[in-house]
Amino acid sequence: MSLRARLALLYTFIVGGILLLFGMAVYVAVSITLTSQVDLLLARTAKTIVNNAGVNLLGELDMDAIQELDLSTDVYVQVWDRFGGLLDSSSNLPRSFDIPLDSVGLRATTPTYRDIYINNAHIRVLSVPLTISGSERVIGYLQVGTSMAVVDATQKTLLVILLIASVLAMGVAAFAGWISTRQALRPLETVTETALKITSADDLSHRIPYDGPPDDEVGQLIRAFNDTLSRLENLFDSQRRFLADVGHELRTPLTVIKGNIDLMRRMDCTDEESMEGIENEVGRLTRMVGDLLLLAQAESGRLPLEQHIVELDTLLLEAMGQMQVLAGNRLSLKLGEIDQVLVCGDQDRLKQVLVNLIGNAIKYTPQGGEVNVGLGKENDKAKIVVSDNGPGIPEEDLPYIFERFYRGEKSRTRSKDGKGFGLGLSIAYWIVRNHNGTIEVSSQTSKGTTFCVWLPLADKECKEEV
Ligand code: ADP
């Protein structure tokens, strides 16, 4: 059964249940009210007769005192002696009717109301034992009764009205439930349609349109679904881009290697220059594969990281020594303020971060430029700053520079020098993230770039390397 049908059925049952309870309450209340009115009439009649009753010299009921039994045409009256003999009855009862209106009531010790059926006629009877005032001795019985036909008819009509109203209301509830659930579930149909479209067309660019309130349950579901789609689309896009980039990066060195081999084959000798070319390209490929493996591990959080105390200042001095060679006389590499800073992590990986950042600054800063490196502590964190006065990174490139294979336009053309793959910053980003740190960049074209790495300081739990 569909969700819609189930909801409509639920509405119907709920409305039906409420109406049933309500109907029962109305029916009981009306019945009690009507019956108590009848009881009041019987009690009043009985009281009038009892007030007139008296006792003769023999201590028996004096019928002469009770003169009037026909107080109302609707009320039947019988007076019985204590031996069960009928003394008198109202004229609306046939003379031949000499059985008690309520035979059980003739044994009652207190006034008792009972419903009796005589020849299928429903009669309510009040039996009152007559006693001499001041004593318990019963000298007779008075029975007053009246037909319940009107009460029964009223109850029957009420029951029919309630039943018809309930059935009608349940019908209306079923219809309203069917319509309103259709309204409420329509967006879900759109979700299903979109999901099917995506599956059949393999196109993640579809989004579910929704013009309802964005914060209701359906709005939230659709937003979550659309967010998931955006994320999936991004992931698929980046996977596609990644394959294209890897293919592109592999092609150049492989072409060079093949060209050199062809050349040597044609010349039928091992040419030293060609061999060097092959060696360079193989080295480049090996570096790229190594970087990719490292990145894959870091992105999946499976990068094996040591957790030891690392003296960042010593590490930075080491990296600066290496980088100085790269900078040569082309530009000035300066070490600014440097504090003694201890962090917890993997020394080799952290050095790789420093080398990548300083290396980039040297690589992209033109001759005569300046690269400044500093280390300090701020807000209980280690802060490494690498800044240069190079060409800067265009604003439109900034959000993407930490992505795999992302290279600025200028760097793309420049990478013919065979060095960059566009992986250096991604690797740095993931290593820093795996150390619970963050990496920030600020840049202005033609003025320079500053990278800032924040790392948590070493805590007591971090062990010294042995
Ligand atoms: P690449 O191998 O191209 O250097 P990276 O991931 O290290 O790859 O850097 C990504 C891109 O960020 C570079 O191609 C370059 O455009 C830009 N970039 C990084 N560092 C700098 C810098 N110090 N100055 C200018 N541009 C930079």
Image (spheres, rainbow, N blue to C red):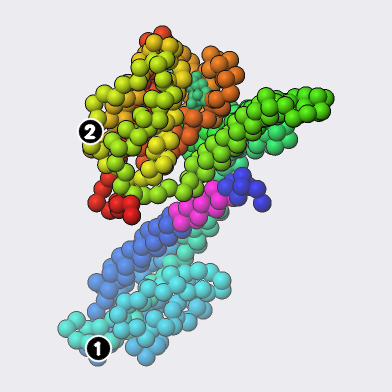
- At a point 36% along the width and 30% down the height, the residue shown is 321
- At a point 65% along the width and 48% down the height, the residue shown is 2
Q: Position of residue 28 (x, y in %)?
A: 42, 60
Give SS at disc 2: loop
Magenta-colored stretch includes residue 16: yes
Q: Position of residue 268 (x, y in %)?
A: 82, 28
| Type of amino acid under label 2 | Asp
Q: Quadrant of residue 270?
A: top right
In this rendering, the answer to whether 425 lies above or below 345 is: above
Q: Nearer the viewer, residue 1 or 20?
A: 1
| CA neighbours of label 2 inside 10 A, class few (<14), some (14 to 19), many (20+) | some
In this rendering, the answer to whether 369 lies above or below 326 is: above
In this rendering, the answer to whether 197 lies above or below 175 is: above
Q: Nearer the viewer, residue 233 or 45?
A: 233
Left or right placement of residue 464 versus residue 196 in this view = left
The residue that label 2 is drawn on is: 339
User: The magenta stretch spans which residues?
Assistant: 9-22
